[in-house]
Each structure stands twice: as C-alpha cells, then as structure tokens.
Amino acid sequence: MSSSWSIQAPTLVGSNYDFWSEKVKSILQGQGCWDCVEIGFIEPNANVVAAMTVIQRKTLEELTQKKGKDKSYILVSLDDSIFPEIIGAKTAKEAWIFLS
C-alpha cells in the first residue's frame, strides 16, 4: 500500500516570521533536509568528486538532492513581495540567514 503525505507550505508575508520559521524548520527536519540549512552545503570541485568512492558519490548525490529540496521549499513558501529580496541566495542557508 502506498501513501502520500502532502504538506502545505506556510507563507512568509513578513509579519509572521516567527510562526513561519518554526513551521518550515520542523517540516525540513521531518524531511531530513534541515542540516543543509543549518550547516550549509558547498559543492565540491571536479577533482574532489573524481577522487570519491562510489559510496561517497552516492552520499554527495543525496546531499545535492537535499540541498535542492530545502531551498525550493523555502522559496515556494515566500510571499511574492518577499521572494525578489532573496533571489540571489545560492543556498538554503543563505536564504534562511537573509530572512532571519
């Protein structure tokens, strides 16, 4: 049996930051993506990737997917009036820091 759980993103409109940040943090923790926001993620260069074992590359792929999930979740939870202010953020951590 397959189940699907859909979580609606709370929308940050500016005045509800405390409420929004706690909900988004909890959602990202539940999805296993909060570590990329809290710690950050730096893409390794090609030489480092080339020297990785298969297991390390698989781990890197998983982290890259998390990085994409967390940033996209933050972006879709922003009101259109706030989104342009963080458009230059390259990572979820950068976006989170800017919003806080």
Image (cartoon, grey):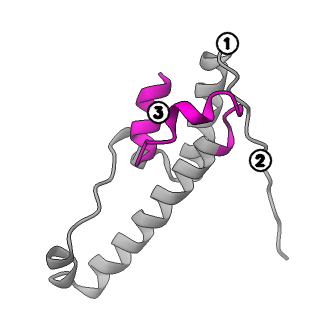
Q: Residue 26: which disc?
A: none
Query: Is 95 included in the stretch rendered in magenta?
Result: yes
Quadrant where the N terminus lies? bottom right
Choose the circle earlier in sequence order: 1 or 3. Answer: 1
Of residues 100 and 3, the one nearer the viewer is 100
Residue drawn 54% across and 44% down?
29
> Is residue 28 placed above or below 32 in the rendered structure?
above
Q: CA distance from mark 1 to mark 3?
A: 16 Å
User: Which residue is nearer to you in this view: 65 or 81?
Assistant: 81
The residue wearing badge 2 is 7
Of tags 3 and 2, the one toward the viewer is: 3
Q: Is residue 58 magenta?
A: no
Amino acid type, label 1 = Ser
Tell me the quarter of the picture where residue 47 sits.
bottom left
> Seen in the image, is 93 located left or right of residue 24?
left
Look at 29% across and 62% down and name the residue there.
43
Picture coordinates of residue 40 (x, y %)?
Answer: 34, 46
Q: CA distance from mark 3 to mark 2?
A: 20 Å
- Mark sitting earlier along the chain (3/2): 2
Identify the residue position indicated by label 1 in the image.
15
Circle count: 3
Residue range of the region highlighted in magenta in the rendering: 76-100
Three-letter code for the amino acid on which mark 3 is drawn: Trp
